[in-house]
Amino acid sequence: MTKCTLFLFLVASYFSGFAQENKPSVGTIEFSSNELSRVIKKDAKIEVLAEGFTFTEGPVWIEKEKMLLFSDVPANTIYKWTEAKGKEVYLKPSGYTGQESRGGFLGSNGLLLGKDGKLLLCQHGDRRIAQMDAPLNAPKTNYVTVAGEYKGKKLNSPNDLFLTAAGDLYFTDPSYGFEGGDSDPKKELSYQGVYKMNKAGAVTLLTDTIAQPNGIGIFPGGKTLLVSNSAENNNGWYTYDIAANGFLTNGKVFYNAKQEKEPGGCDGLKIDKAGNVFATGPGGLWIFNKTGKLLGKIKLNGIVAANCALTPDGKTIYITASNYLLRVKMQ
């Protein structure tokens, strides 16, 4: 390297670093309780890992492959992100495989790794939960229906899902995949439901009382279900006791966010091994302890947080928000 080349390299590096340091932050971390410092370091940063998407959703961390998969719902695409290569197209089409041209949120939404190591997808456009019939490291648009109907009627547009250690699959089914919303003539069910599918494939309706059920998770111990409601002007999170027969009882408000005016609804969520809840909601990502006490927020500047994924060690959280993929390294 010549002296001139070295000089130009140093100048470019300086200004590149200056630009990064002075790039507007996408958000801040707000500590409402000292308890949050056990989960997130005071000096933790919100990193932008990738951008340029339409609307990101449904992330899942695949530990074996050291990769994050996430949906771009309007683009009908699943992306892959790795530390080595950044973002790459992983699967397209991901949620709508029909030939008819139509609008609405058509792509995949929630993603999950099944017991057999295969990818499960909530497919808005195809109105089902499907399994990718291909290895994770060799993806193909070969899909097998896992759940597509309830009592002979097609589901609305499965949104998010949770798999228990016993093999029961819980999922939410709002109406966001319809071009015409609740009044779409193709809608066969008169409600939006929360369902459970057992290992034998039988689908049971657990509740139809939530206007737009969205994110879903079960607390450690397997006895309490948490569901978000993303209906406009009815934002909030609810808990239910899971009875011995699998049905839900004792429904109550976990946290009411109806009065919040910041962008975004109560959307996807994850629960860590200690029972802490990471829930996307108005203004960003809300963090609660298992009793519903608000510990703090990852506040995002004008960006709608949609969902999140935790690594198995609980030290890193990935956030899908508007056209971004974000990361926060916690403890």
Image (cartoon, rainbow, N blue to C red):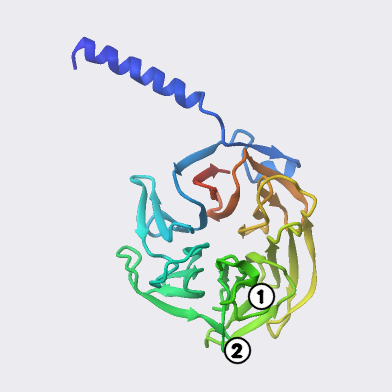
Q: Residue at x 63, y 64 (%)?
A: 214
Mark 1 residue type: Gly
Q: Nearer the viewer, residue 127 or 294?
A: 127
Judged from this view, the residue extending furthest toward the left is 2
Q: Circle 2 sits in a helix, a strand or a loop, which is it?
A: loop
Task: Residue at 60% x, 72% y: name it.
Answer: 184
The N terminus sits in image quarter:
top left
Q: In this view, does 50 lie above or below 278?
A: above
Residue position marked by numbered label 2 in the rendering: 151
Q: Quadrant of residue 142?
A: bottom left
Relative to 199, does residue 226 appear above or below in the rendering?
A: above
For the residue pair 175 and 99, the one nearer the viewer reads as 99
How far is mark 2 from mark 1, CA to CA? 13 Å
Residue 9: percent from the left, percent from the top? 29, 18
Percent from the top left, x then y, of residue 49?
Answer: 45, 42
* Picture layout, residue 102 above or below residue 258: below
Residue identified by numbered label 1: 193
Mark 2 Cα within 10 Å, few/some/many (few <14, many 20+)?
A: few
Question: In front: 73, or 223?
Answer: 73
Residue 327 horizontal side relative to residue 293, left or right: left
Counting from the top left corner in percent of width and height, residue 63 is at 43, 58
Corner quadrant of residue 298: top right
Type of the residue with mark 2: Lys
